[in-house]
Image: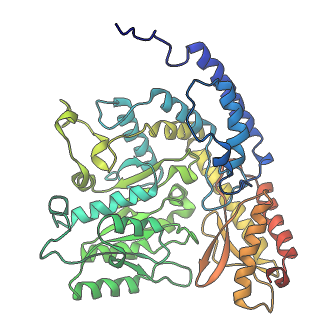
Amino acid sequence: MHTPPAPSANDWSPEEFRSYCQQVSDWIAGYLAGLRSYPVLSPVQPGQIKSALPASPPASPEPFAQILVDFERVILPGITHWNHPRFFAYFSITGSGPGILGELLAAALNVNAMLWKTSPAATEMEEVVLDWLRQMLRLPEAFRGVINDTASVSSLCAMAAAREAAGLQVRDKGLSGRQGLPRLCMYTSEQAHSSIEKAAIVLGIGQQGLRKIPCDHHYRMDVEALAQAIRHDIAAGYRPLCVIATIGTTSTTSVDPVAAIAELCAAHGLWLHVDAAYAGVTAMLPEKRDLFTGWEQADSIVVNPHKWLFTPIDCSVLFCRRPDVLRQAFSLTPEYLRTAEQDQVVNLMDYGVSLGRRFRSLKLWMVMRSLGTSGIAAVLRQHMSYAHRLGDLIAAHPQIELVTPVWFSTVVFRFRPPAVPEETVNALNARLLETVNHTGAVMLSHTVLRGQYALRLAIGNLRTTWEDVELAWRTVQEQAEKLTTADLG
């Protein structure tokens, strides 16, 4: 007769967990305190981390103490430190202390908030915390929020709702092979985030169905060009669905004229989605309200707390003024997910693609309570003051120039030595970015604007000081002085 194996403990005892948790929390505290000692950009070469890891999984249990040793020995060198105070690339982000602990508690609870029944607290907290955020941003009460992982998914869901609102029965009948269905099209700025184009691909609109509208000299969507594109498409038999405007574009953080775009959308019955993933949180500041004029007329808006609200990634909020349409686009309830109270509650699975849903609102709740609206506003103002101060230094430099206005906390500039051909200037700036980042002291990113290669310095980390920004500026100047056209040849 087969003898079953003896039972064993499959997880740590409370004592073991407490001991290891203390070790990890001590490490995290030391890491956060000593972040400036790390090179911001990981210095490893492609394949280096992979080659340092075993090719096969362990057959037997391994001591957690050894796992922590290997974490520091193998993994840490391959980390580009997004949580570093001098990470100025892309859009700077922060895993704050309250947010980190919120993640820890959410992981311990390990709930799936797909239905109200599967986690009432996760569902109702998400409703309440997002209404707090709505109030902070001074959006009308009609807006309801839902948390997704990233703005890419939030915008995808918004665009799916726009397609649903058009009454084309795409949910039931699909797009493929349908007779009598006109070609669908959407509109956005040529400076819009690439996720908008990806969403058009996923939704069956296609890249050819996404109209990229030209911008003015400050990289804001040209409303007259938008109006002409819509009129042209209607005359050609196309079916316009929506316009995606941006407040805080990725390359330049420019602000589209949302009020004028909203008026145009209303005239043509088009859904208006506003991508404010980066800059949306600044709507809480009275001095920035003019930049948000008209966004309250949008049908949907995305704001990412994991960008500039000091919440660990991932946490993207989609606000929708027509949540019934969003639900109609996605709600699908098989028998095994039906509950007695489903008509009395919100089931978060009904408002997006994912069935499984993490308890993301917990960390956002902890961040908002720990900082308060006054604390959040103070940090936002501080970051923007650093950016404007840096902008003034660049404007006064004889060989480095601002490429765009400083709208929020991102500064776009380039090295422009006199009497150097434009094609050489672009190569020079690409080289400058590489040398600055390889110092390890700071990390910047780049963009290309109308053929001009430019550097971006984005401020957004909770721990960043003026001294950090000043060091970045000094590093740029030092590396620029070392570069000559001979270096490129």
Q: Does residue 393 appear to the left or right of 195 in the view shown?
A: right
- Residue 206: % across, % down: 33, 73
Residue 263 is drawn in which quadrant?
Answer: bottom left
Residue 99 versus residue 330: which sits nearer the camera? 330
Residue 373 versus residue 402: which sits nearer the camera? 402
Residue 435 versus residue 261: which sits nearer the camera? 435
Residue at the extreme front of the image, as rendered: 1
Image point (34%, 46%), residue name: 354
Q: Does residue 441 appear to the left or right of 368 in the view shown?
A: right
- Residue 407: % across, % down: 60, 69
Image point (28%, 30%), residue name: 117
Look at the image and tell me in which quarter the C terminus lies: bottom right
Residue 269 is drawn in which quadrant?
Answer: bottom left
Image point (20%, 84%), residue name: 237
Look at the image and tell me in which quarter the N terminus lies: top left
- Compared to residue 169, the image places residue 378 above or below, namely above
Residue 339 is drawn in which quadrant?
Answer: top left
Q: Is residue 451 visible?
A: yes
Q: Is residue 294 visible?
A: no
- Residue 274: % across, % down: 41, 65
- Compared to residue 286, the image places residue 183 above or below, namely below
- Compared to residue 415, the image places residue 95 above or below, namely above
Q: Does residue 137 appear to the left or right of 484 in the view shown?
A: left
Q: Does residue 258 appear to the left or right of 167 in the view shown?
A: right
